[in-house]
Structures are given as structure tokens and as C-alpha cells.
Image (spheres, grey):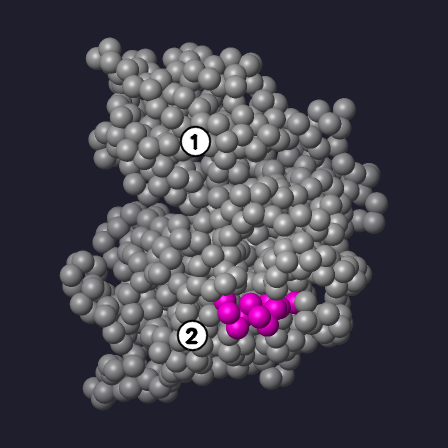
Amino acid sequence: MVFDLDMIKRVYAMYPERVNAARKVVGRPLTLSEKILYTHLWNGNASVPFERGKSYVDFAPDRVAMQDATAQMALLQFMQAGKKRVAVPSTVHADHLIQARVGASKDLQDSLNQNNEVFNFLSSISNKYGIGFWKPGAGIIHQVVLENYAFPGGMMIGTDSHTVNAGGLGMVAIGVGGADAVDVMAGMAWELKFPKLIGVKLTGKLNGWTSAKDVILKVADILTVKGGTGAIVEYFGEGAVSLSCTGKGTICNMGAEIGATTSTFGYDESMRRYLAATGREEVVKAADSIAEHLTGDKEVYENPSQYFDQLIEINLSELEPHINGPFTPDRGTPVSKMKAEASANEWPTKVEWGLIGSCTNSSYEDLARAASIVKQAVAAGITPKAEFGINPGSEQVRYTADRDGILSDFEKMGTKIFTNACGPCIGQWDREGAEKHEKNTIVHSFNRNFSKRADGNPNTHAFVTSPEMVAALAIAGDLTFNPITDTLTNEKGQAVKLSAPAGDELPTKGFAVEDNGYQAPAEDGSNVEVKVAADSSRLQLLDNFPIWDGQNITDAKLLIKVKGKCTTDHISMAGPWLKYRGHLDNISNNMLIGAVNFFNDKTNDVKNQLTGAYGEVPATQRAYKAAGVPSIVVGDHNYGEGSSREHAAMEPRHLGVKAVIVKSFARIHETNLKKQGMLALTFALESDYDKIHEDDTFNFVDLASFSPEKPLTLEICHSNGTKDKIQLNHTYNASQIEWFKAGSALNLIKLMEN
Ligand code: MIC
Ligand code: SF4
């Protein structure tokens, strides 16, 4: 079955005219990213050219995807928007809430028991509002989207930062907070600052041990976790064409790790093959009819430096397998340098676990290539040194890999096959012994490796690499093993050299599945009841955030000055806290508990300015709130990097924090703060961060004249009686300032509805 084919055809029918209109106003050949953006303008045909990195533009995305951990908040907000049905095709995927412990069938049943209330809520609210629901076990959102919904040239948003995965099928797919999803589902325009464009020209061809993953590990190493901020990364060149479609997905997926708005590839043979293999020949037919518009113009790819803001060139033939980490996905080490790096940095080299899966690398091809390594090891009589776990990306992938003997290859090595879900990637991993906090190393094919992420242990050194390299390193049990040059020793004491991985891009016998786990919504959901128990600890209906009283914020206290990296995992931890994603008050008890306090280098230990005593961040903030004292949070660079979870913005808002002032923001988090009615501000002078002391009191002096492109002024009163005045920049446009004034973007929608 092809979902929403009519919608896809409608989009394609508009394409030629809209692309031509765009080419006319822009006055030059277009990149693929521009074509997709300009064909999805809310106002129809382009009439003015937009300034990259400057213009705020209203878009009309074709679809919305949500996963269980973010859909709860998104749909709790949508309920309040007063609509009968979603305005564009939308789906919910139950994938994040399933723990990996002993293996798929037991783990899935346990998760159903534990999360019954939330799954029922998501299933019934989806049913009511016309949203497709993918049941627990159906697969990871981005794999399911790639297999069923993504289409070349389309635009979608999703409440998860790795929505960008769909760029593998030539979409512009963007991760957002739930409040943004509400706009689109409510039939309103969706606003985005027109992105800058980074071109990545791929030459040559992958060979030997390198895989698509290494392309993005290399790009992450070059651009760092903030190098892609505000930009779309467009891949092109002969090397791009030679990659498989799911390999392209891997590359786009991890574009989230460099802060990129999204990444994309032009429509090509690999996409045709993938669409056909996943039962969408009809989409191929439709796309072929406008194929010239579904890739960048020839002139652009011939002279890329003229058209992109930044250009990177990577020769796939020379690329080496990479192992990125620990603690950050942009610290890249080519496999040949790992010995030296590990010893210089005293990383534990014994690999204890190898994990394959996550939305980044859980395709059929990924499993097949990794299995080819495992198979060799089994045949040569090598016992793996580390434990092994796998999360297939979808039930379709799992079923097919099982039929083709791939899973049994893994099982021969004692691999645990976990549920088709996020599992360890989101900290849903009941790893034995993690509570001992021992220093150790794991390798995985995921995208993120922030401290504590997979198992909650701050001393776990997690390294990101390709599935085939995960297999090799886990079998060797050694982080410094280089399969290209080194040998392993088998049971007989013989040296064995592994040959390079090989695996089918797509199953030769075709994909198969018995029950894909999809639940279609009711035609008319008006009678469907959505229940939220008043005493639930998991779900809570939302109250409006208070509107701005028109006054300056004065006598504000410093809740925390965060030192160094502060991802959304630090602000609103996942793992054990995922269970409160639908209950704002309960989840607020994790607010900023992972952030390091600049003044004592501790986490979750800040000074309460009212009592002088040190205590946990959420409790301290609750004390300010109870006393009616406003507070601010101060942070470093790329604050809020990582997830799209808007809880990281709603929690401070709920607990009474008024402003978050940092050196720089990650895109999604900045928007989330704005949408929830918070002040998201940056130091005009970065060094003013140093002026913030622990006992300071803060006064805004010109909030009444809050307007676009005009910095705000903050008075800092130090405890020794001296004062500083500093400038704070912001990126609010006029309508975003209205969100602040109304208390939140949702308050504004409600006002408009009434
Ligand atoms: C992640 O990979 O961090 C997550 C969990 O998928 C998040 C979404 C969430 O926090 O629910 C993301 O990437 O947006
Ligand atoms: Fe799930 Fe991990 Fe992908 Fe996030 S990155 S969607 S947690 S698999």
C-alpha cells in the first residue's frame, strides 16, 4: 500500500510552475534545497527571493511525524488548539518507550505493561484526530518514515531531531518541537529562517571497510557539533549517486549531530530502487515525471562554490573508517590513528559492548553487512570478546532479516536481538552493572554518545562507528583493533584476518512482513474519547502559561550558570525520565540536573540565593517560584544541542525561569524556548558570560520596547554593590515577540480560535 499517494501527486503537479517561479525571482540556477523550499511556500509561487540565514519564511510542509516520547506533549498541545482533525497527513510512532533488557518478546511485553496508559492515550488521540499510529514494536520512527512515507522533493517536519533521516529519499525533513508540529497539524503556516546552504561534493566510491557512516563521521569531524547550525547540507557528485538510499539516510540522519537544519540528496537510481523495493513503484512513476526538478540544477553542481555558502569535498575512495567519540559525536578518529589516540587520552580500550541499531543504522543493508563480519568470525572459530545487541529499525527489516538468516548469524554469536525500537540509543537499556559507574568502553552504530546517554553511567566511553566496524571491534573486544591491518586469534590459536564486509543493499527476495504494526485512524473520530486520568503520574492536561504582564523582569536570581556542554540530555534527561514525558510537572523534576554548575563544577547542586544553602536545581527553582522570585539560566555555546524535546524549554517555563542567556543556541531549542514564551537571549559580547557571578541579581531595563533586531539591556547587580550593564542579542521577529507577550505560541493560537 502506498500512503498518501494523492498528496504526493498534488505536490508534484505544482512543482514545475513553482520551480520556474523561484528560478525567475532568484535569477539563477537553483540547488535542490532551494527547489524544495521554494515549492513549499505557504503563499504559493515565489514572488521575492529570500535571504539565506536572515529571512523568516512561512512554509507549508506536506506531512508531520511524531514519536511517542515527544508526541505526548505535542498532542496535549494540539488538543487545546480546538481542531477536529489534523490538516496534513500525520503519524505517531511508538518506539522510544521500549526498554532493551533481555530480548525483543519479553522486553516488548514489559513495555506494553508499563506504558499501557501512554500507548492507549497515543492510540486513541491518533484515532480521534486522523493520525496514523504505528504500534510498539513496529519500528523506529525514521526507518518507518523512510520505508513508507518519505518521497523525493517533499517537505516534512517531525518532533524528533533525526527527522532529517528522510533526506535519504530526497526530502527536506526537519526536526522541530511539538509546538511547531501543532502549527502544521492545525493548518497554519510553519515558520523557519531561510537556511544557509552547505554543499558536500562526494567523489570516488566507498570501498573495503568504509561505509556511508564514515562520510558523516568525517563531516562531523570537519564541521563540529555546531558547524551546520542554520544550514541545509546538500550532497551531490558521483560519490553521492553511488551510495545506497539507506546509506544516504544514515548520512542525513547524523546531520542532526552537526546542528544542520537538515541534509538532502538529489533523486537518483538508489532512490528508485529503494522506493520500488518498499512497494512504491507508483511514487517512482510520479517522481520520474518531474525528475529534473528533484535534483539541483546542472550548473550548480558544475560550479558549486558559486551557489553554496560553504563547500566541502570528500573523496570516498580515500575515506577511512572512523570511530567518533567519546562523549561527543564530532570527535573523529580514523581507525588507523585509534591506537595512538586512545593511549594519549587514556580511553579504556577493552570494548565491553557492541550495539547495532538506532534510526541511523538499522537498515537491511546495515544488518547484512555487519552479519557478514559475524559470519566470518563464527566460521573461523573466533569467540567474541564483547557482548552484542541489535535493534532492527522496523518490523519489516526484522522480519526480512530473519527470513534471510541474518539474525541467526548474529544469534550464533550470542547476540541479543532487542525490540524494533530506540532502546539503548535513548537510555532505554537496563545494562547490568551500569550503576557501579565503572570506567568502560562501548561501541555503537548510533548517532549520539553524550555522557550517560546509553546506560546512565558517566564513565561509559561510547564510540560511534559503522555497524560493520561495531561488529569487528566487539568481536576483537578492542577499541584499537584495525580490521584492515590487524588479525584476530581463533580458538586454535591461529591468526585470522577478516575480509571486508559485504551485504545486499536490498533483500534479493524482496521485503516481507506479516504485521507491520500500523493502525489507521477512524474516518470520523469525533466520538472517540481521549482519557487523561486526573491522578495520573504519566499524563497531565496542560494549563496556559501566564501572559507577560508588560513589566520589566526585575530582581531575578541566577538559578545556574552552566559550564561547558549543555545538551538537551543535560537539561531534560531521557532514560528513566522518559516515563514523565506526558506530565509536565513531574518531568520538571529533572530540569537541568545534568548541567555542570560553573561555580562548583558539580551537577545538580546550586546555591539558593534566598537561603544560601546548596540544593538540587529543580528544588531550588521550585523554591524561587514559591517565593515569587524570577530567575534566569546562563549557558555556554550551542546550548540545547541534540534533541527536539520541548520539555527542555517547557520545564524552565513551568517552574518560573524567565530567561535563558547563553553564548549561542542550537536551532530547535532556541525555537522551542520562544514558542513556550521564554526569553532566549545571547550575550552580545561573549566575554560577558564571565561577568555573571553566583550571587548576582538581574534587572531587565528595556523589555517594554522589545522589538526585532534591537538588543535588550540587562543590569547585573553584584553582591559587592557594583553593577554591570550588558547587551543581549536575540533573533525574535515581530510575530515571535507576540508569542512572548501572549505567554506562548499556543496561547496565541487559542486567542485566534476564540
Ligand atoms: C534523541 O535521539 O535524543 C531523541 C530521544 O530521539 C530526541 C527526541 C526526544 O527527546 O524525545 C531527538 O533526537 O529529538
Ligand atoms: Fe530513537 Fe536514537 Fe534515533 Fe533518537 S537517535 S530517534 S533515540 S534511535
Circle 1 SS class: strand
Residue name at image x 59 percent, y 41 percent: 56
Residue 333 visible in the displayed image = yes
Could you tell which of marks 1 and 2 lies nearer the N-terminus?
2
| Drawn side of residue 45 relative to residue 142, left or right | right
Q: Position of residue 346 (x, y in %)?
A: 17, 58
Residue at mark 1 to residue at mark 2: CA–CA distance: 42 Å
Residue 589 in the image, given as x and y percentages of width and height:
43, 30
Compared across the picture, whether 153 is left or right of 584 comes to right
- How far across and how far down the image is residue 586, in percent? 49, 30
- Type of residue at label 1? Asn
* Residue 55 falls in image quadrant: top right
Q: Residue sitting at 64 percent across and 34 percent down?
A: 77
Q: Indicate yes or no: mark 1 CB to ligand 1 under 8 Å.
A: no
Vertical arrangement, residue 246 with respect to residue 263, above or below: below
In this rendered view, identify the residue nearer to me: 679 or 654: 679
Residues in magenta, as a range? 294-304
For label 2, the SS is loop
